[in-house]
Amino acid sequence: VSYVFFPGCSLEGTARDFGISTEAVARALGLELPELPDWICCGATPAHQSDPLLATALPAKNLLAAGGKTVAVACAACYSRLKAANHEIAADPAVRKKVAQVVGADYDGQTPVRHLLEILVRDLGTARIAEGVVRPLAGLKVVCYYGCLLARPPEVTQFDDAENPTLMDQVMSAAGATVIDWPHKTECCGGSYSVTDVDIVLMLTRDVLSMARLAGADCIVTACPLCQINLDMRQRDVADKYGDFFDLPVFYFTQLLGLAMGLTPKALRLASLVVDPTALLAARGIVPGPAAPAAVALSGKAHT
Amino acid sequence: VAARADVRPHELVRLVQLGQRDAVLAARTIWECISCQTCITRCPQKVDIAAMNDALRRLSLAAGKVHPKTTVPVFNDIFLNTVRSRGRMFEMGLMTRYKLRTGKLLADIGKLPMMLRKGKLALLGPRVAGKAERKQMFQRARQAGGTNK
């Protein structure tokens, strides 16, 4: 399969670390993800709340530009909008006709759209991922958080089981992590309401964070820029409002997979995370801890 | 979110069936629905609450009945304007304009230095070619019955 990559706006802004770690992991796996030239915003939530036709036309314009190649997506929100456009255009000739008028060209709704997790598990396969793992995340207890938009509605996204998706769990298992089953995989974090009505986000993220801690997780793994920033950056606000600081690092799955593949914290932009994961990763022996530099120096001497 | 709603989802559906136009369009709950798609995924009758709320939002805007406490239409408006002119989102620009239009100048302002330090905010906005073409797209969507401003 040959792919074109649709990064989406967040991967150039608040989720730059997701974008950079995605590129780094793809390179390490030999997965070619050339960027779709001149891609435009998928319209996200504001488009489908304001103008359903525009909300379908914006993704259609991008999918048409892919020229029949498979569109690879990392952002769950872009993925959802591209899939929804395909679904609506393929299902209803009247929609297809209206969208053609808006875009200025006919689009049949048939450009394949794949999330990076689907590509890793279904196209590459977990065996190939496991082969690339040089530093297994042994002892790191993770919960995988999928949020809303990857798995719902299942008729539209056809991603995985809508109530119990496992694609990210499989990737994390291949990376050597201890994957904990938990009931909040597909709860909602509140998405863009972080700007317009933050109390909703604090209420919802607190539920997710509480359950992650109850489940015994060291950290949360995400596949969506909105999930990540809400769970990570709002932890301090949750503490201020509810008096409970969780101190749970919240990674993108590409960052943890990259660590397992031997990439450096810098190459994966771990410094962009708000809840600092360094102590946790050092305690599990995944990155060098405070005492480790001396050990490295000693072993270096032993070799010379 | 349904738990804190002024009108809960099943009540909203019933009000729509009963033709209680004003009560529905003035409800805050239609602006609090986060489109998580859980309703339609679990409903055996496939009642699409999120799509219903999208439609009710547009009717509420058109009728001038938007609940005074919500800022969602302002956010949506600025977001789509940014996409039309730049082609992609520009978070710094979006937040600045949102703050100016809503008067929420200080919300999250303390996070700004951290976000800049951690490389979470691009300082320069993106510019994708094809602005004239995008403007036409937005206009044609409006002409075909769309409701972008």
Image (spheres, rainbow, N blue to C red):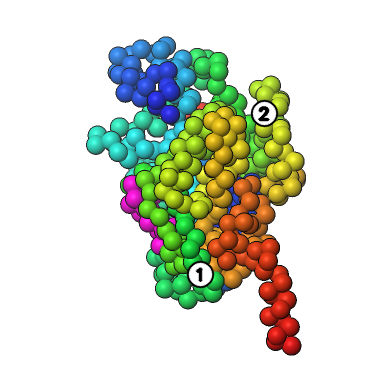
Q: Is residue A289 above or below residue B123?
A: below
Q: Is residue A166 magenta?
A: yes
Give the structural element (helix, strand or loop) at label 1.
loop
Residue to which mark 1 is pinned: A136
Crowd rating for badge 2 (residues with CA inside 10 Å; few <14, some 14–19, many 20+):
few
Are labels 2 and 1 assigned to the same chain?
no
What predominant SS class does the magenta segment belong to?
loop
- Residue visible at 60% across and 31% down? A240
Q: Is residue A131 above or below residue A147?
A: below
Q: Position of residue A116 (x, y in %)?
A: 48, 59
Query: So how many labels did they put on this image?
Result: 2
Q: Is residue A158 visible?
A: no
Taking the image as shown, residue B76 lies to the left or right of residue A166, namely: right
How much space separates mark 2 and mark 1, taking CA atoms?
41 Å
Taking the image as shown, residue A203 lies to the left or right of residue B94, namely: left
Q: Position of residue A298 (x, y in %)?
A: 71, 78
- Residue visible at 42% across and 37% down? B36
Point out the residue furthest to the bottom here.
Answer: A304
What mark, if any, has residue A148 been given in the picture? none
State which chain disc 2 sits on: B
The amino acid on which the numbered mark 1 sits, given as a three-letter code, is: Pro
Task: Look at the numbered discs 2 and 1 and tell me whether their residues touch, using CB distance below 8 Å.
Answer: no
The amino acid on which the numbered mark 2 sits, given as a three-letter code, is: Ala
Q: Position of residue A132 (x, y in %)?
A: 51, 74
Crowd rating for badge 1 (residues with CA inside 10 Å; few <14, some 14–19, many 20+):
many
Q: Is residue B120 above or below residue A26?
A: above
Q: Is residue A203 magenta?
A: no
Residue to which mark 2 is pinned: B107
User: Magenta residues, as a range?
Assistant: A157-171
Viewer-side residue, A104 vs B22: B22
